[in-house]
Image: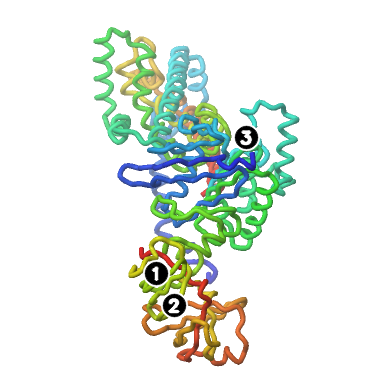
Amino acid sequence: MSGNDAYIRIVEVSKHFGDVVAVDTINITLSGGEFFSLLGASGCGKTTLLRMLAGFEAPTTGEIYIDDAPMSEVAPHHRPTNMVFQSYAIFPHLNVRANIAFGLRVDKIDKAESARRVDEVLELVQLQGFGERRSNELSGGQRQRVALARALIKRPKVLLLDEPLGALDKKLREEMQLELRSLQKALGITFIFVTHDQEEAMTLSDRIAVMSNGRALQIGSPKALYNAPDSIEVADFIGKMNFLDASVSDVEKDQAVLDAAGLGKVNAASKADFVRKGANIVVAIRPEKLIISADRPGEGRAAVQGVMQAAAYLGDRSHYYVSIDGAEKPLAVAAQEVDTSLSQSLENDAKVWLSWADDALVLLPRG
Amino acid sequence: MRNISYIDKPNRTLMVYALVYLAFLYIPVLFLPLFSFNDSIYISFPLAGLTTKWYGQLFANEPMFASLWNSVKVGIVTSIFSTLLGLFAAKAVTRYRMPGKAPVVFVIMLPLVIPYIIMGVALLILVNRMGIPLSLFTVTMGHILVCVPFAMATMIPRFEGFDKSMEEAAADLGENAWWTFWRVTLPIVFPGVLASLLLCFTISFDEFIMAFFLAGTEPTLPIFIYSQLRFPQKLPGVLALGALILVVSFIVVFISQWLRRRGSDDFTSSEV
């Protein structure tokens, strides 16, 4: 199935609950074997979209195709999808083995084969020896594995995961992320993963759809979303970003000259339509793309002077907040390591210089 | 005393209250077994002597056994049907969005507050009009009517208490609605089903007024007992019967509580 470029097609799908529009005209095409994340804050419609893929909710309008078959008339128990629920939904009256084998009844396979397959997935999720336990004798991470095994034993073409790592502590979550990723690569199953954690989505996904208010704001690889967000919302949601109001004073070919609040005249590359002469736009720059220094950097490099407001030492990196004239909020700066001579001069109220490369600036339409 | 927290501190006043309360509840009941062993047809102190003859008479009492058997039959049929109806109603009320849910629940629950004597008279008129002869069948119908709300009220918390995504998971794993019900829903709500069966049986077994109106020539046990009270010499036999019922009830309640506790151990700690 991998290699199929349009394995799942979500076409113009909307879902209304009374007057509430939970999902608003979503179009997504997924290829087979892809790890795809739906990322957004709670209430953005990502779980509703996942539940429509599973068949628990019917789209109000639009259609979902899996392998070119329309799904709206297909009941959940006939779909080639399986789901890992946020609550895991482990059956409390059954032990781990019976939970995992639950879905095999309808496949009408004999006992020996069934036992063999249960052993196989128990090994896959590293739960050998836990077969006789009940769900209340398992830890959160183990339950998560049971839920995963129970879905995987069905050998689904698409695995739907509804914030499966949300209930785990940070360390376990990171471990499970790696395991999920390598499992998905090994099995070649299409994973659709719902999460509100942008770091998790970035770690795991081939592609991410950033959702807000029922809409898919932008769909792309983690890299594309991080480096070339196409709206303020996406730029703000994925990582940290400084925003400055700007107006376009000149455009020539793909090069724009801007007048940005606090930065003055700056050059930036942009191909977008909204970058027209005289247009009011927003200039964005990532904290780690700003370089902090005590002295003015060399000639020909764009730079601005500011005043240090606050500094936070995080071990592997430090965060600084530098206010510059003309900008509403202090700019956030992230630096991995700063030499000691500089760090001494980086006290509060010290004057510092911020510099950047022209291609570090991202131009966004004003919201 | 230092290690005893505020909440664990013994409180003498409350202890006395609890004892008085228990005495109030159970001393009258304890007169039943006491006088059932008394060698006199008069219920008065001092006790005349120990005897088991009332129990002997009881076991030779054919009409008593017939009415006991009638009550058991009515009770079993009532509890099964009420629990089935209550089970489906509880599932519908807790699981589905449907129009007119509130009025429907209200109508089902209404028999809880209508006096049985009113219900009994109403049903009597109805079955007479419809030409249905009075029998254990009509008693059972009446009992189902009053038991369904109890069954439903017993099972609704059970349905509310378990994660709806369990049923979705079953559907997701390939089971249709019927198998989902058998393999997931029923096992999880089973302690509630058992509780409902016991409760409905008890209510039916105990019910007098409606049975009095709706029974034909075959009396249920409460009707039989009532008829015996007219004859003073039959009273000790009734006491013996009452004492036996008391013992059986205690055993049933004990078993049901034990089942309930075991059920909640299995299920409540497991999920969300």
Q: Is residue A117 left or right of residue A106?
A: right
Q: Nearer the viewer, mark 2 or mark 1?
A: 2
**Foreground residue among B103 and B244:** B103
Do discs 2 and 1 belong to a common subunit?
Answer: yes
- Against A355, residue B212 (above or below) is above
Do discs 1 and 3 belong to a common subunit?
Answer: yes
> Which of the numbered marks, if any, corresponds to residue A102?
3
Crowd rating for badge 1 (residues with CA inside 10 Å; few <14, some 14–19, many 20+): many
Marks 1/3: CA distance?
54 Å
What chain is tagged by disc 2?
Answer: A
Quadrant including the N terminus of chain A: top right
Dot 3: element: helix
What chain is tagged by disc 3?
Answer: A
Marks 2/1: CA distance?
12 Å
Dot 2: element: strand
Does the image show residue A321? yes
> Which of the numbered marks, if any, corresponds to residue A282?
1
Toward the front, the furthest residue is A253
Q: Position of residue B70 (x, y in %)?
A: 44, 16
Residue at which label 2 appears:
A266
Q: Nearer the viewer, mark 2 or mark 3?
A: 2
**Foreground residue among A262 and B240:** A262
Crowd rating for badge 3 (residues with CA inside 10 Å; few <14, some 14–19, many 20+): many
Identified by mark 1, the residue type is Val
Quadrant including the C terminus of chain A: bottom left
